Amino acid sequence: RKEVEQDPGPFNVPEGATVAFNCTYSNSASQSFFWYRQDCRKEPKLLMSVYSSGNEDGRFTAQLNRASQYISLLIRDSKLSDSATYLCVVNRIGNQFYFGTGTSLTVIP
Amino acid sequence: DAGITQSPRHKVTETGTPVTLRCHQTENHRYMYWYRQDPGHGLRLIHYSYGVKDTDKGEVSDGYSVSRSKTEDFLLTLESATSSQTSVYFCAINYGQGRSYEQYFGPGTRLTVT
């Protein structure tokens, strides 16, 4: 079983829509959780860390459910510039990170 | 900007030739990583380093070796390149302290093995 699983999409949504991505992780010992954004032919960039209490950064909201081993990312009021692949990432103690295969988002004018 | 550079950025090489990719960081980070990214597989760890001369294998280490003789440089070598090693290679560092780390990536190297 993969450490991290994501729906690859693609998600094609109109501008202004709300879209949600989900991710599950297999190892209950996972300690830290992140969403990264990757643009075409570029490196992944940290979008936000995910905390147990949930956290929000502008139009982006991330939530963690440890009991279900589930992470989510909600994007409100989608912009054309949000088009990218979103990677779910988990970390266990020991400095190793595990990456999902990514969910592709295209925001349509 | 985590101060990570990779070289070369693009390389085309022939099967059977040795190839070395370089990752350079300017901020004295202890941990450095090499990943490859392929469609359908996401990022997979090749090798990582936790200090000068301290390295360990990752998930897909076969056919690759690494060296870290200085804190700032982490080299990835394909001893005899194969077509299955055509990929995008990313270097990364860990940033943080205690139990909380984040990873930051270099711009990547696109390697094509013909």
Image (tube, rainbow, N blue to C red):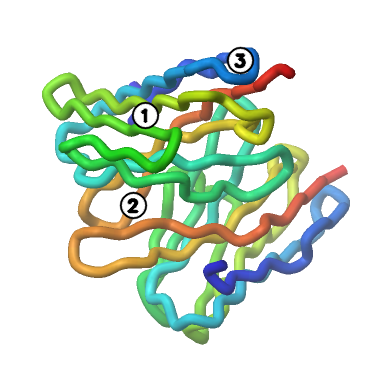
Q: Position of residue B69 (x, y in %)?
A: 51, 84
> Looking at the rendering, which quadrant does residue B19 occupy?
bottom right
User: Which residue lies at the image location 47% right of the left edge and 83% below the top edge?
Assistant: B71
Mark 2 belongs to chain = A
Query: What residue is drawn where x is 36% and y is 29%?
Result: A4
Residue that numbered label 3 is attached to? A10
Disc nearest the viewer among 3 and 1: 3
Q: CA distance from mark 2 to mark 1?
A: 13 Å
- Image check: A67 left or right of A32? left
Give the letter of the chain under mark 3.
A
Q: How many marks?
A: 3
Name the residue carrying label 1: A4
Locate the C terminus of chain A and report the quarter of the image it occupies. top right
Residue lying at 60% horizontally and 41% vertically, measured from the top left:
A38
Give the amino acid at mark 2. Gln
Name the amino acid, label 1: Val
Q: Position of residue A34 (x, y in %)?
A: 36, 42
Query: Of all residues shown, which one is farthest toward the left?
Result: A67
Give the vertical position of B69 relative to A32 (above or below).
Answer: below
Pick the residue in front: B68 or A45: A45
Q: Would residue B69 be found to the left or right of residue A21 on screen?
A: right
Callout in the foreground (3, 2): 3
Disc 2 secondary structure class = strand
Read off the residue under disc 2. A96
Report the side of B99 relative to A42 (left or right).
left
Which numbered tag is attached to residue A32? Answer: none
Q: Residue at x 53, y 74 (%)?
A: B67
